[in-house]
Image (cartoon, rainbow, N blue to C red):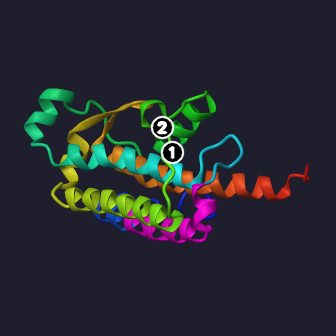
């Protein structure tokens, strides 16, 4: 995950599932590369690696839950998609534009992390919760046909209504994006002159 955009841009449901699992495995390895205390420590004024994972979990859970709601309820609640799904790359560009314009996590920001006695246990719990959320999303995704991914929509707090396919594209990218944000901040901290 050296770049925010994967060389394997997903298109189909099966591509999305593979990418969700690949990103989960690669990002877990990255999060495990931190010492437990470092995983929990803020990166200057920015979120800690743990906070990034908690934010991702907080954003994945409602998508997984929405994909388990009866489709009639989704249509009644959010309407039908009025435009075709954008490609992964097009959705990423729209999201990057929103971030560049000042878009933030809002209600999906992680709550303050309570200090626990054992940093390793805290990291294990945070990563297990994320793994469970992604597994639930993958399982829920399997119930959706290719056509249905483009017919139904969900609201995104920053991007507006997205088709289910676009929401899944966002979820793949969002997880990669946060790993790369942390990588960048860690590299900046290492390059900064000592005070």
User: Measured from the top left, where is residue 50 in percent x and y?
Assistant: 53, 54
CB atoms at circles 1 and 2 under 8 Å apart? no
Residue found at x 51% / y 51%: 115
Q: Which mark is residue 92?
A: 1
Q: Quadrant of the N terminus?
A: bottom right
- Judged left or right of residue 99, residue 189 is right
Q: Nearer the viewer, residue 55 or 81?
A: 55
Extent of the magenta region: 19-40
Q: Which mark is residue 109?
A: 2
User: Measured from the top left, where is residue 152 in percent x and y?
Assistant: 21, 39
- Judged left or right of residue 129, residue 119 is right
Q: Is residue 148 above or below residue 152?
A: below
Label 1 SS: helix
- Judged left or right of residue 47, residue 145 is left
Residue found at x 26% / y 50%: 64
Quadrant assignment, res 131 = bottom left
Among numbered discs 1 and 2, the one appearing first in the sequence: 1
């Amino acid at each position: 995950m050296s770049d925010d955009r994967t060389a394997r841009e997903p298109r189909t449901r099966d591509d999305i599932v593979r990418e969700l699992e690949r990103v989960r495995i690669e990002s877990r390895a990255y999060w495990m590369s931190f010492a437990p205390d470092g995983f929990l420590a803020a990166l200057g004024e920015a979120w800690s690696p743990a906070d990034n994972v908690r934010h991702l979990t907080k954003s994945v859970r409602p998508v997984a839950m929405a994909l388990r709601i009866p489709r009639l309820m989704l249509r009644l609640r959010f309407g039908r998609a009025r435009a075709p799904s954008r490609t992964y790359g097009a959705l990423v560009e729209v999201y990057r534009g929103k971030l560049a314009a000042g878009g933030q996590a809002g209600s999906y920001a992680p709550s303050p992390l309570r200090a626990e006695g054992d940093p390793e246990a805290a990291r294990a719990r945070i990563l297990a919760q994320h793994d469970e959320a992604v597994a639930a999303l993958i399982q829920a995704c399997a119930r959706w046909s290719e056509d249905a991914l483009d017919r139904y929509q969900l609201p995104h707090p920053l991007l507006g209504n997205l088709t289910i396919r676009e929401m899944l594209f966002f979820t793949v990218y969002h997880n990669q994006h946060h790993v790369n944000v942390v990588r960048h901040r860690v590299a900046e901290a290492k390059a900064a002159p000592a005070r």
